[in-house]
Image (cartoon, helix red, strand yellow):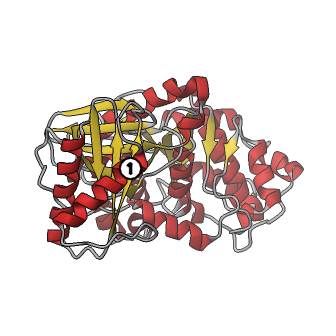
Amino acid sequence: MSGAPSLPTTGTRDPDRSCVLLKHGEIFLKGRNRRLFTERLHDNLRVALRGIGGSTWIKIAQNVTVLGGQVPQEALVERARRVIGFNSVQPAIRVDSSLDAITAAAVRTLAEVAAQRPVASFAVRVKRRDKAFPMTSSRLAAHLGARIQEALDGLPVDLSHPDLRLAVEIDHKETYLSWARYPGQGGLPVGTSGRALVLLSGGYDSPVAAYRAMRRGLACDFVHFTGAPYTNASSTYKAYALARELNRYQPPGRLYVIALGRAQRQLAVVGAGRLQVVAQRRLMVRAASALAVRIRAQALVTGDSLGQVASQTLANLVAVDEAAALPVVRPLVGWEKQEIIDEARAIGTADVSVLPDEDCCRLLAPPQVSTRATLPQLHALESRLDLDELIAELLAGAQLMRPEAEGGEGGDGAGGAGARVGSGSTAPGDASTRAARASATV
């Protein structure tokens, strides 16, 4: 999702009256647990608002969150649209819940929007959360529509396909008037389903899988495997840039970088042959499982799509799963490649994914990859290695980074770049720029 939408301005740009209505998604179905889901949703919203440049406030209504503050409304809308768990984001104004105040605000809002762009027709939609309000929703809508027509020289009403919808939501003390509606991320608040570790490559698939996992409530950390010391650092810069972009949608997750090159060469030396790719995928999920246990993640997430490449046949996916100590979640298992690319563009990761890099998966890959690797074959191959010692070496050399979303949305910026697992770290500069520079040397 790119930048903030262009919002029509209204005469009530007073930050004390300007606000944003955030409509809740799936959490309204949660019954007795709804309060816990709402609390997590608001915690995530507060993280998304960090560094916005002014004070903000959050108010709770029925299945709606009201957001405001001493910052531009456009900035609030941009941040709120990235918080998973809200179905829609509506710039609005708030007025006293009196007929005179509501009428004056409705007329003023429509007049000012119409002054900025042509408005061919309009409709008024009224929702009463306060059933004690003296007029029914339909009567108030008719009243407001008549007053607006009087003020705007008979502007046509179109209840089926209006050019502009004015939404009026009456609460006990305040009424909210909104003239625009933007889609939110939907889904469940990040963190309500637990924590997962995403195997993050530099391609299109795994970032989209991570985003889809987040929308199902999983807080995500990331692990990236490089071919070092036989490849350069370009894939690390890409992984950092991708993790930073994904962290716009969640409280910031950590990125772990593991150099797999020597282990890949060991597999080749002991005769992996056509099993090389599947065997190194098993090695990745073994290492990722061990890391996940350390960081208390409950599942692994991969970008596998069934049948997309030779290593992702059903037989090979089963073989990889057998090496994992935790459940392997594959959100994209039934997706086509173009669907994945389209989603990557929508969430903002595609521009990084297209940068060239030295991918560890291509390192030592055989001319032909086995599409039906069997467990006896793989077990025989792995028996030639000391897997426990190999996994311990991989984790001992892992580096921890803390990618921050651009502009300080989230991220705590602790520590120093390139720290070993267990110590604090931060960004290696501007990762997207570094990724682009590194790609030029590949």
69, 293: nearer the viewer: 69
Number of numbered tags placed on the structure image: 1
- Residue for point 67% across, 52% down: 281
Q: Indicate the quadrant where residue 235 lies.
A: bottom left
Which residue is farthest right? Answer: 376
Q: Which residue is mark 1?
A: 139
- Residue for point 50% across, 30% down: 37
Residue 132 visible to an observer of this rendering: yes
Q: Secondary structure at mark 1?
A: helix
Measuring from the top left, give residue 319's x and y in whole percent. 79, 50
Crowd band around label 1 with a 10 angstrom C-alpha radius: few (<14), some (14–19), many (20+): few
For the C terminus, the quadrant is bottom left
Q: Indicate the quadrant where residue 125 lies.
A: bottom left
Measuring from the top left, give residue 115's x and y in whole percent. 14, 70
Q: Indicate the quadrant where residue 408 lies.
A: top left
423 w.r.t. 152: above or below: above
150, 361: nearer the viewer: 150
Give left or right: position of 410 versus 380. Answer: left
For the N terminus, the quadrant is bottom left
Residue 421 visible to an observer of this rendering: no
